[in-house]
Amino acid sequence: MLKVVNLSKSYRSAQETVEVLRGVGLAVAPGESVALTGESGSGKSTLLHLIAGLDQADGGEVWIEGACVTGLPDVRRAALRRARLGLVFQQFNLVPSLSVADNLVFQARLAGRSDPAWLAELSARLGLDALLKRYPEQLSGGQQQRLAIGRALAVKPALLLADEPTGNLDEVTADEVVGLLRDLVARSGCGLLMVTHSTRLALRLDRRLHLRGGRLT
């Protein structure tokens, strides 16, 4: 589902060059959930952004579903994100002017991949059935995060990238959200790569990777 080969990334300033990623390689299989841990500033978010095509690597390759996407132009990377990737961030990025129902289907409609049966299943599993006519500002933090997860999965992505998706949630709600994430990923068959600072949450996923000094261990 995902293969990263010898990925490198540096940031340059007038004073110095900082190597953030040094030959990173990893793979995520269909239906597999992988936790990515590491200290603040270790490059976890940078790695997710490179995989998602939100930034460009200095070297190496990213393969998704057997296709190399590293050298694609911006327009084609954006099309890939829309149709084959699900993105969940600590900031939920919901559309405040849209109802819960319309937020849920938003990305799937853009990609032309809306599936009413799958949307109904997501809505039920995420506990959103009774909230579909509400707006994001009328939801709790946990409900907003569930909606963000549902929106990302509604498109039936090949790969779900989650960057600290439980960072704003209390421990009980975080456990519930990660449990739902893992179940829905297994149900949909997509791969999950989740950045987290929590060892406790990382242990709930299938496999754990740790980023230190620009390399994975």
Image: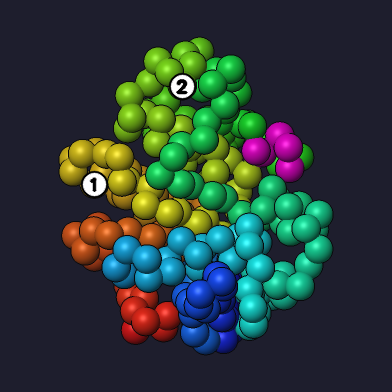
- Relative to residue 206, is residue 173 drawn left or right? left
Q: Residue at x 32, y 59 (%)?
A: 196
The answer to whether residue 181 is visible is yes
Q: Nearer the viewer, residue 16 or 66?
A: 16
Dot 1: element: helix
On the image, the x and y values in percent for residue 1 come to 58, 70
- The single residue placed furthest to the front in the displayed view is 15
Dot 2: element: helix
- In magenta segment, residue 110: yes
**Residue under label 2:** 136
Query: Please, what is the dominant secondary structure of the magenta stretch?
Result: helix
> What's the mark number on residue 155?
none
Kind of residue at disc 2: Pro
Mark 2, residues whose alpha carbon is within 10 Å: few (<14), some, or many (≥20)? Answer: many
Q: Nearer the viewer, residue 171 or 12?
A: 12
On the image, the x and y values in percent for residue 134 come to 47, 14
Residues in magenta?
107-111
- Relative to residue 34, is residue 108 drawn left or right? right
Q: Residue at x 50, y 77 (%)?
A: 16
Residue 96 falls in image quadrant: top right
Q: Residue at x 78, y 58 (%)?
A: 74
Residue 105, placed above or below residue 211? above
> What's the mark number on residue 175?
1
- The single residue placed furthest to the top in the displayed view is 133
Residue 154 falls in image quadrant: top right
Residue 64, placed above or below residue 201? below
